[in-house]
Amino acid sequence: VLGGAGLAVAGCGGGRESAGEFLAGRVRLPEPFTVPLPIPEVARPVSPGRYEVTQRVAAVEILPGLRTEVWGYGGTFPGPTFELRRGAPAVIGVRNELPVPTSTHLHGGVTPPESDGYPTDLVVPAGYSSPHAHPGEVRHQVVRDYRYPVEQRAATLWYHDHRMDFTAPQVWRGLAGMALVRDEEEDALPLPRGERELPLMICDRAFEEDGSIRYPHAAHHAPGHSGGGHGGGGHGGGGHGPADDTHALDADYMEGVEGDVILVNGAPWPVAEVTATRHRLRLVNASNARRYRLRLSPGGRFTQIGSDSGLLAAPIVHDAITMAPGERYDVVVDFSAYPPGSEITLLNTLADGPAGKVMRFVVTRRAPDDTAVPATLSRPPRRPRPVATRTFDFRRTNDAWTINGHRYRPGAPLARPRLGTAEIWRLTSDFHHPVHVHLAHFQVLARNGRPPAATDAGWKDTVDVRPYEVVDVLARFDGHRGRYMLHCHNLEHEDMAMMADFEVV
Ligand code: C2O
Ligand code: CU
């Protein structure tokens, strides 16, 4: 493990804004822009409104010529894309054939608490037994149904594992995929669709020489320390039961884990052929800890049409988009600005070297294009008047990643907002903490008392809180009562207990 720049210097004042412990893989890196961009399968319902997906171990080819074992929804990485429609409730039956328990969270979903992927609400595989249980832990044997009412606006969502203490290693092994909610408001717009709508799940990973996924073997994931009682040991980090103190800080991945290979839809630095027309890109940062500043080279613009939680009222044009883990940007790029034959590279200007490149588009030919980005896209909900203000301080205290001084305590909510109200949540931090709130969507009101960034526009569920920043968001608590979480979406920080419950009452 390289890096370890230290908390005090990381990310302050421009320049390198990297947050993670950089993990150089041991494999020879493939030539960028040679692997074709894969598009994840769209999940097919087994009956109207019902899907079934099995989490299993599978061998896939990520690096050309090498086999990589992944833990995937449906045995793929990313998992299948769920196409959901507002007003059409969906049930997703998840079967766990992995060696470890899981919990599935639909990120950005307005979901009842019992289907929200609470970290101790587990699906355990056949034969799994561990005497170590967290207080309040629930174990569903092998399968369970997650129920999604899908009453929310069209938006780019994603889903991933959320198991207590082990989210980071389990997502790193592949447990993530996309979900798109569509609705009539979006249908009515002349946006690019079909082959001209590309879901792009971006994440970094590191690999061993033999193609296996590399992850730091942190002390609290090691056998012997954790006392885990089942046979998952051969799978490395994440294969062990919870320990008495799994929340201890671990220097091996204190700042989160970053790999040197950038994957888009599970392929390393892929290439996509596009006609010289508008394309809609659904950008998801599914990385554990890596932030990206995306730019087009040799130049170009992103017309943002949607944020985490749905379409913007009006498009916003950006030269660059910074994405923290968990965030989504729904953008249109007009490739008619480039002559056929052009190669347009999507860069990450926050990194040098291999992680500074993401993917490439090759413009094939001119083609008819009857799409447009209208000046008015949607009528998002207005900002309600807040009834309370609360502060959540994301900070390293007593050698732990904490919120308001506490490590995660399941079942001990830090706030009880009332259903149907809105509150100002002031998020403060000592480091890069991408703060994600379950259930509640929010708008960024201010950063350090000043207006938010252009890329903060719209309703969101994850916000990039930067070192020593004070970010005010207006959150609305609609849809469901019950127990939810807010946490840092640097997944290593999440596992190191930078999470808290809140209860909508
Ligand atoms: Cu995407 Cu609680 O997480
Ligand atoms: Cu964090």
Image: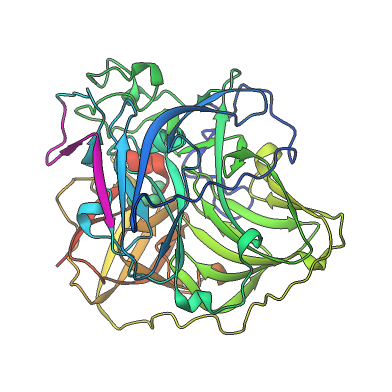
Q: Is residue 36 magenta?
A: no
Q: Which residues are magenta?
A: 132-147
- Judging depth in this view, the residue of 482 and 55 nearest the camera is 55
The colouring scheme, among rainbow, by chain, secondary structure or one colour, is rainbow
- Estimate the x, y position of residue 179 in percent, counting from the top left: 44, 55
Whether residue 117 is situated above or below residue 245 in the rendered picture: below
* Residue at image location 33% in from the left, 30% down from the top: 97
Task: For the C terminus, give its image quadrant.
Answer: bottom left
Q: Quadrant of residue 419?
A: bottom left
The total number of labels drawn is 0
In the rendered image, the vertical position of residue 10 relative to residue 336, given as above or below: above
| Residue 8, position as x, y percentages in the image | 48, 45
Q: Indicate whether 47 appears above or below 415.
A: above
- Residue drawn at 14 percent across, 49 percent down: 411
Q: Is residue 482 visible?
A: yes
Residue found at the very far front of the displayed protein:
47
User: Where residue 147 sits in the image (x, y, percent)?
Assistant: 26, 56
Could you tell whether 358 is left or right of 204 in the image?
A: right
Q: Residue at x 24, y 34 (%)?
A: 142
Front one among 276 and 202: 276
Residue 90 point in image, percent of width and height: 32, 58
| Residue 142 is a magenta residue | yes
Residue 399 appearing in the image: no
Q: Quadrant of residue 233?
A: top left
Q: Along the horizontal axis of the image, is 40 left or right of 326?
A: right
